[in-house]
Amino acid sequence: MCTSEPEVRMESECDHFRVNDFNLSTANVHPFPLAAMVFIFGVNFPESQLVSRSLKSFYGIGPNVCTKLMAKFHIHNTARIGTLGDRQIDSLAAELSTMTLENDLRRQLQDNIKRLRDMGTYRGRRHAMSLPVRGQKTRSQNMTARKLNRVERRG
């Protein structure tokens, strides 16, 4: 047992932890620093994250679209989210809102495949049977197509 008595005791009689170690009443500072976040298109990103990485995290934005967006708004490849100005963030969010991304793009993909299946086209039948759609050989290897067509693309 310590010689100094803690001001507030926990129920477990643990003397090495005191609630008053963090004097929250005198300072307006959180005892653990919080990471600053930037809100873009419905997602919070930490300020230390690269702009390119955060843009690529959206479904429907790959490397090419990401570089075109960054070039359009004059953003360097190694720029971080925290270094962007408010006007750049607002214009980037406005541009993202005009694009077809995330759930809308997934729904569009499923609707296209469902349309092919309903018409009875060759591609639609291949999707329905979970077989390769683009002319790949099926004699020895078709597990990748079976996984993809079964899980993500079936509607």
Image (cartoon, rainbow, N blue to C red):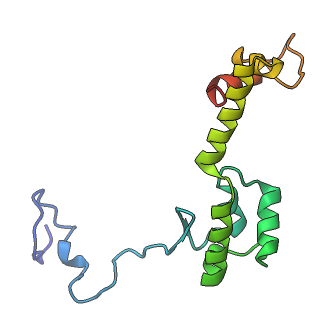
- Relative to 73, is 23 on the left or the right? left
Q: Is residue 104 above or below residue 133?
A: below
Q: Position of residue 54 (x, y in %)?
A: 65, 62
Image x and y of residue 41, in percent = 57, 64
Residue 46's spot in the image, x, y percent? 55, 69
* For residue 4, above or below residue 144: below
Which residue is painted at 20% across and 85% down in the image?
Answer: 25
93 or 112, which lies in front? Answer: 112
Asked if 136 appears above or below 82 in the picture, the reply is: above
Query: In the rendered image, which quarter contains the N terminus?
Result: bottom left
Residue under the point 67% across and 79% down = 88
Residue farthest along the front direction in this orientation: 119
- Residue that appears at 76% across and 21% down: 124
Q: Is residue 127 visible?
A: no
Query: Can residue 4 be seen here?
Result: yes
Where is residue 19? Give x, y as percent. Answer: 19, 72
Q: Nearer the viewer, residue 86 or 109?
A: 109
Task: Tell me which residue sits at (53%, 61%) in the image.
Answer: 43
